[in-house]
Each structure stands twice: as structure tokens, then as C-alpha cells.
């Protein structure tokens, strides 16, 4: 596909790229002047990125229209979630921290920080925040799920299985939690359990690729 880069509507660069799914593409360009109106187009509009916030007009509001002098913890939390969804992880880290400063009992903010620190490979900090979330809400499914994922990565499989087991009680995390448990059983050579939990995962989401891979390896 052809990747085109525009500045203020003028074509700056055009080159052919061939990428695999999830492959990261990097390039460096010499750009002079304002880059606020940067636009990238891949192929026949397969992917379009525009740095201008006013580039597209949507029929639904994308920003909070309420005039708030002092943001509440709930407002800051929603802002942090939006930043995470937009992959602005460095800013969402700051905003989740601001939520906790305003409300130290905001459980989901600790879970958000745990996820972000896990992404950054800072596992001790991730565990610190997942533990704090669980100390406030022991049965919180999201907190248990991320706690279990971190524990699995650090090799504490017993603790990981316990946390993922609690996460699996929630419909929203059940398939992913069972697949993660199946992965642990596979790594520890408990193939019968790996097959069982991969099957459980697929019972709730037939499209869970990780569960399918575990079944393929186990057989």
C-alpha cells in the first residue's frame, strides 16, 4: 500500500510500504514549519490519521461541554480513560495519579495505573497498584484480572491462578481469564487442565485466539 503524508493539504511524502498485522512502521522526515495539520493516508483510505482536532465533524459530542471550575475525581478518571483509549499513556498515567490525589479510595484509578505500569514493564509498581485496588475491593474483576496477569509474568503462578479465578466470575473477563489460566497450566505441563480451561474460554468467546492456540499446542 502507498503511505502518503500531507502538511496543510500539500503532499510531503509518498512511499510504498508492506506491513504484517501489528507490525510497527517507523520513518523519519525533515519537516519545517507548523505540523498541527499533519495528515497520513494509507492505501485506499484504509487508515487515515489527522492531527487537527477539527478535521472531521461528528454528530456526537467528543468533549465534555460542562463548565467545571474544579474537576472531580470522576471527571478526571473519565479523562484518564479517554487518554488510555487514545494510547496517550504518559498523560493518562499523570491523570490517573491526579484521581488518586483527589480521592485515595478510587479503586479503578489504581487498576488503571497497574495496567499502565504493566505496559511499561514496571512490574513492581504495577503490583503495588493492583494490590492497593484489591485491598479496597477484593472481588473487583478488573483488578483481579490485571493482578493475575502481572503475577503470571513474574512467575508466581499460584497467585496468578487465584486472581484470575476471581476475575473469571465476571462475564466481561471470563473468557480472557480462562485463557490466561489455560496458558499457565500449559506452561506448567498440566495439559489436561490447559485443555479444560481453554475449552471453558471458548465456551464464552469462540473467537478467543489464545485459547485456540493453547488447544492446538496441547493436542
Image (spheres, grey):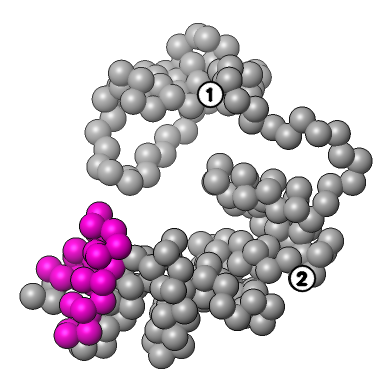
Q: Position of residue 191 (x, y in %)?
A: 17, 84
**Mark 2 or mark 1, earlier in chain:** 1
Cα separation, mark 2 vs mark 1, equals 38 Å
Please give the residue where the numbered disc 1 appears in the rendered image: 50
Name the residue furthest left.
219
Q: Which corner quadrant of the image does residue 217 belong to?
A: bottom left
In depth, the one of 176 and 169 nearer the eye is 169
Q: Nearer the viewer, residue 60 or 90?
A: 60
Assign the N terminus to one quadrant of the image.
Answer: top left
Residue 170 included in the magenta stretch of the image:
no
Query: Callout 1: 10 Å neighbours few (<14), some, many (20+)?
Result: some
- Check the picture and name the quadrant holding the C terminus: bottom left
Question: Residue 82, how many percent across, how many down?
Answer: 62, 44
Element at label 2: loop
Residue at 84 percent of width and 47 percent of height: 71
| Residue 188: image location, x then y, percent | 26, 88
Instruction: Specify the principal SS of the magenta part.
Output: helix
* Magenta region, residue range: 191-216
Q: In the image, is residue 3 above or below residue 102?
A: above
Tell me: 146 left or right of 24.
Answer: right
Q: Image point 76% across, 48% down: which residue?
A: 75
Q: What SS does tag 1 mark? A: strand
Q: Which residue is mark 2?
A: 105
Residue 100 placed where, x, y %? 77, 64
Whether residue 218 appears in this view of the structure is yes
As drawn, 20 above or below 111: above
Asked whether, in this view, residue 30 is left or right of residue 219, the answer is: right
Q: Is residue 123 visible?
A: no
Amino acid at each position: 500500500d502507498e503511505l502518503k503524508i500531507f502538511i496543510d493539504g500539500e503532499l510531503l511524502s509518498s512511499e510504498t510500504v508492506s506491513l504484517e498485522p501489528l507490525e510497527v512502521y517507523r520513518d523519519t522526515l525533515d519537516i519545517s514549519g507548523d505540523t498541527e495539520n499533519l495528515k497520513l493516508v494509507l492505501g485506499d483510505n484504509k487508515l487515515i490519521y489527522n492531527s487537527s482536532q477539527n478535521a472531521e465533524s461528528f454528530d456526537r459530542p467528543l468533549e465534555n461541554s460542562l463548565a467545571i471550575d474544579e474537576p472531580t475525581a470522576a471527571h478526571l478518571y473519565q479523562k484518564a480513560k479517554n487518554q488510555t483509549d487514545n494510547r496517550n499513556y504518559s498523560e493518562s498515567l499523570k491523570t490517573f495519579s491526579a484521581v488518586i490525589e483527589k480521592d485515595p479510595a478510587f479503586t479503578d484509578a489504581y487498576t488503571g495505573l497497574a495496567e499502565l505500569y504493566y505496559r511499561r514493564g514496571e512490574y513492581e509498581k504495577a503490583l503495588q497498584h493492583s494490590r492497593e485496588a484489591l485491598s479496597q475491593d477484593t472481588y473487583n474483576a478488573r483488578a483481579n484480572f490485571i493482578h493475575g496477569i502481572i503475577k503470571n509474568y513474574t512467575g508466581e503462578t499460584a497467585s496468578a491462578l487465584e486472581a484470575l479465578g476471581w476475575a473469571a466470575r465476571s462475564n466481561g473477563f471470563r473468557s480472557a481469564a480462562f485463557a490466561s489460566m489455560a496458558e499457565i497450566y500449559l506452561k506448567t505441563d498440566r495439559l489436561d487442565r490447559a485443555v479444560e480451561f481453554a475449552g471453558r474460554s471458548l465456551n464464552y468467546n469462540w473467537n478467543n485466539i489464545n485459547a485456540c492456540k493453547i488447544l492446538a499446542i496441547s493436542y
